[in-house]
Image: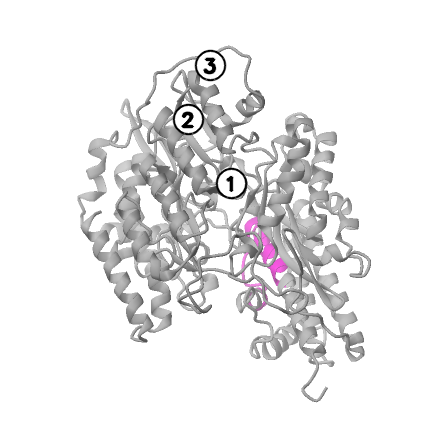
């Protein structure tokens, strides 16, 4: 392994020992281990209805080594796979590690990484050394750093690309890895490359920095460069990236990235982590001022030969086919081959070769399956494998003459499902299975949607088949629900004394054009009714769409009022005694609760007022969306603000019965009674969402209203209302808990 990598791992192993001895404080060590790719994970995602603890049922029993302490409870190891490129030895090494140190599952993430879950921290140095021996690092896979740099997995073989961005993504990855200028960020920084502008493969629009390959004729010479964007991001409130340079010369890619990093490190938010991403800095400064500062910083940089050294050999990473090009042999073909060929094969620009997509349900493959894929690669393609941002796995340079035999190999390993990139290929974050922020089971929902849709996929119309469905377990959009045709984000609702898992339904997003449009939530549906949501939406779309009309345009044409109206009956929750299945989540039979809550009569009127107030505020958010869709930007912005005030009032009035309707008084009392007392804080919302309301109130009338700012305020209003619901649940539980005397 590289000597520098070996030294870093030795240092990390020493830090583990020092932390155990109490010689390094936990805050410092936490950032240290995150920068090495070591995450804590959710080990027990709740309690059984009888109050006894139990872990998630979706994973096998982890390798335990002792008491459930921070040192002995399993965690997660994120493995950095730059632009998703993997070789045979690397895949086999990870298969071995998953089997020896984890639960035997390799999980592909939406950043083209590989994650291993249930890994013990004491094992991580050895795991890192074995990865380093095959050229893989976990450094800066997590933490306040430049995360894994992603790229379209078709670059180099795509018919529509300007040029292959692989050498540029590779050069930037290792230029920034461990660079001093990225060690002082307030938050993470994500970069993506795309070979073209129209397709979604690179999804540069929602990245901190996105680079789209472009060429330009300059004095008769075709010159390479990049359309460079900054300040994009999904998260709780999505921001579209802003154009920094319409044609950045290839020689300027690395130094400009360094200059952007320095500006972000110097001026980015430090105290309030919820505002510490670069998207907030770009919004605060404006793109013109941000660009001025970046160019000023660029002029100060000390020259570095690495900026352009890689340009001397842009073909260093070129892939070469293992087998000669050929034509697909004549049939008959094995069962399922034609359906698989239709959805999982992409014809390369190189005649006679194809890209094969292996659909990974929930992004998972077993160690045995990973070894089988490595064998197929060794036999048919060589080191040409790549992971994808929609959690699949691809092989490039498969001779068309070998497609039938390749398919047979996939059938033998259980990975020959068709439907790659279609409605059945549902994307999901880890959700409540392993993520500490998960609210609802996004993986469980995605698995159920995939199961139900697979039963009818031979009957699906092409328009329905082309839809993208994505699920997130919370508001953070790790499942990329904002850019799905139909997206879902996990929330909870209180129904009587019990909590019920719900998902907000998000429509109007666009996966194409590099994630070109963000959707908005239109209402929360109980988790168990979500499959019916998908059925109704796809069926109406197929029935009423115009020729060539994408789903987002269909939603805008009929209006979100119509969309919500067709789903409103699904939003109702029957009593537990009538339908107990509503009160558990997908993939988890336990009652979705922290324990039964006694009903107290004294809370009746307060609960009724609060529920009505929150329901009214949620309706205001929806009306704001309708106004937004009608082009009434200022009215939509005002309605979103009113929704926040309404939700704040509904909660605050319980603590101050004399509260007036004056927004200034509501904001002041909300801060004093709910924020300063930490009543509004919880592990999911924290101070983040309360500050959304207080900031919106403080900026009222002081900030220019644009289409983008109105869209963002609507997003923030929905998040604030969801957080208010969660706060109401906690307050209700506290009121109804028996006292010591009782």
Distance from Cα at disc 1 to Cα at disc 3:
34 Å
Looking at the rendered structure, the secondary structure element under dot 1 is helix
Task: Please rate how many residues cluster around mark 2, counting C-alpha atoms within 10 Å: few if below 14, some from 14 to 19, many from 20.
Answer: many
When the figure is inspected, residue 693 is found, relative to residue 301, above or below; the finding is below
Quadrant assignment, res 629: top right
Residue 433: x and y, percent? 55, 55
Residue 246 appearing in the image: no
Quadrant assignment, res 48: bottom right
According to the picture, the residue beneath numbered tag 3 turns out to be 328
According to the picture, the residue beneath numbered tag 1 turns out to be 515
Which residue is at a point 45% across and 67% down the rendered structure image? 272
Nearer to us in this view, 720 or 538: 538
Q: Which residue of the protein is positioned furthest toward the bottom in this rendering?
A: 741
When the figure is inspected, residue 645 is found, relative to residue 371, above or below; the finding is below
Task: Please rate how many residues cluster around mark 1, counting C-alpha atoms within 10 Å: few if below 14, some from 14 to 19, many from 20.
Answer: many
Residue 115: x and y, percent? 43, 49
Looking at the rendered structure, the secondary structure element under dot 3 is loop
Nearer to us in this view, 85 or 657: 85
Magenta stretch in the rendered image: 693-720
Which residue is at a point 58% across and 23% down the rendered structure image? 336
Distance from Cα at disc 2 to Cα at disc 1:
18 Å
Q: Quadrant of the C terminus?
A: bottom right
Of circles 2 and 1, the one toward us is: 2
Nearer to us in this view, 522 or 627: 522
Which residue is at a point 34% across and 58% down the rendered structure image? 123
The secondary structure that dominates the magenta segment is helix
Q: Earlier in the sequence, mark 3 or mark 2?
A: 2
When the figure is inspected, residue 499 is found, relative to residue 217, above or below; the finding is below
Nearer to us in this view, 321 or 285: 321
């Amino acid at each position: 392994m590289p000597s520098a990598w070996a030294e870093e791992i030795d240092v990390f192993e020493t830090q583990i020992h020092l932390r155990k001895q109490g010689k390094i404080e936990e805050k410092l060590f936490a950032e240290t281990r995150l920068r090495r790719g070591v995450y804590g994970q959710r080990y027990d995602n709740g309690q059984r209805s009888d109050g006894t603890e139990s872990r998630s049922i979706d994973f096998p029993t982890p390798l335990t080594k002792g008491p459930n302490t921070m040192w002995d409870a399993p965690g997660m190891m994120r493995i950095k796979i730059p632009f998703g490129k993997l070789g045979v030895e690397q895949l086999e090494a990870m298969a071995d590690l998953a089997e020896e140190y984890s639960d035997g599952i390799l999980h592909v993430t939406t950043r083209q990484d590989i994650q291993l879950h249930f890994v013990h921290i004491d094992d991580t140095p050895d795991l890192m050394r074995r990865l380093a021996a095959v050229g893989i690092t976990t450094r800066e896979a997590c933490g306040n750093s430049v995360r894994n740099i992603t790229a379209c997995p078709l670059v180099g073989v795509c018919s529509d690309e300007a040029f292959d961005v692989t050498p540029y993504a590779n050069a930037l990855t290792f230029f920034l890895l461990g660079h001093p200028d990225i060690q002082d960020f307030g938050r993470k920084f994500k970069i993506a490359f795309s070979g073209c502008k129209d397709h979604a493969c690179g999804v540069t629009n929602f990245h901190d920095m996105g680079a789209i390959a472009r060429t330009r004729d300059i004095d008769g010479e075709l010159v390479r460069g990049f359309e460079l964007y900054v300040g994009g991001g999904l998260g709780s409130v999505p921001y579209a990236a802003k154009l920094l340079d319409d044609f950045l010369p290839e020689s300027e890619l690395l130094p400009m990235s360094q200059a952007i990093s320095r500006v972000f490190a110097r001026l980015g938010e430090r105290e309030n982590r919820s505002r510490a991403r670069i998207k907030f800095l770009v919004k605060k400064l404006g793109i013109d001022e941000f660009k001025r500062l970046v160019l000023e910083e660029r002029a100060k940089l000390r020259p570095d030969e690495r900026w352009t050294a890689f340009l001397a050999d842009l073909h260093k990473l070129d892939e070469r086919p293992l087998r000669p090009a050929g034509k697909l042999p004549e049939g008959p073909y094995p069962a399922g081959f034609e359906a698989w060929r239709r959805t999982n094969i992409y014809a390369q620009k190189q005649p006679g070769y194809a890209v094969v997509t292996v659909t990974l349900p929930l992004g998972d493959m077993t160690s045995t399956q990973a070894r089988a894929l490595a064998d197929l690669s060794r036999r048919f393609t060589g080191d040409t494998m790549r992971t994808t941002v929609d959690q699949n796995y691809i092989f490039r340079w498969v001779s068309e003459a070998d497609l039938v035999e390749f398919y047979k190999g996939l059938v033998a390993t259980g990975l020959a499902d068709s439907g790659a990139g279609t409605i059945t290929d549902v994307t999901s974050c880890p959700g409540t299975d392993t993520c500490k922020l998960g609210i609802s089971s996004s993986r469980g929902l995605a698995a159920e949607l995939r199961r139900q849709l697979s039963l009818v996929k031979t009957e699906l119309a092409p328009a329905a088949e082309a839809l993208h469905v994505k699920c997130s377990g919370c508001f953070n959009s790790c499942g990329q629900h904002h850019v799905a045709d139909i997206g879902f984000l996990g929330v909870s609702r209180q129904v009587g004394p019990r909590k019920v898992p719900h998902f907000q339904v998000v429509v109007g997003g666009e996966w194409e054009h590099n994630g070109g449009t963000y959707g908005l939530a239109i209402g929360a549906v109980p988790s168990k009714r979500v499959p019916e949501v998908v059925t109704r939406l796809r069926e109406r779309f197929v029935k009423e769409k115009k020729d060539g009309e994408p789903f987002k345009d269909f939603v805008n044409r009929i209006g979100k009022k119509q969309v919500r109206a067709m789903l409103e009956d699904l939003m109702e929750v029957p009593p537990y005694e009538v339908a107990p299945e509503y009160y558990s989540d997908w993939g988890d039979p336990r009652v979705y609760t922290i324990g039964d809550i006694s009903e107290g009569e004294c809370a009746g009127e307060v609960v009724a007022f609060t529920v009505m107030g929150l329901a009214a505020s949620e309706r205001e958010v929806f009306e704001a969306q309708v106004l937004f869709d009608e082009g009434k930007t200022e009215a939509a912005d005002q309605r979103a603000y009113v929704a926040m005030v309404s939700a704040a009032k509904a909660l605050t009035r319980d603590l101050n019965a004399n509260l007036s309707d004056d927004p200034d008084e509501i904001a002041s009392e909300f801060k004093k009674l709910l924020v300063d007392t930490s009543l509004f804080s919880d592990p999911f919302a924290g101070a983040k969402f309360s500050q959304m309301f207080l900031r919106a109130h403080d900026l009222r009338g002081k900030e220019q209203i644009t289409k983008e700012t109105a869209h963002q305020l609507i997003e923030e209003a929905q998040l604030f209302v969801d957080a208010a619901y969660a706060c109401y649940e906690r307050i209700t539980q506290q009121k109804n808990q028996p006292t010591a005397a009782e």
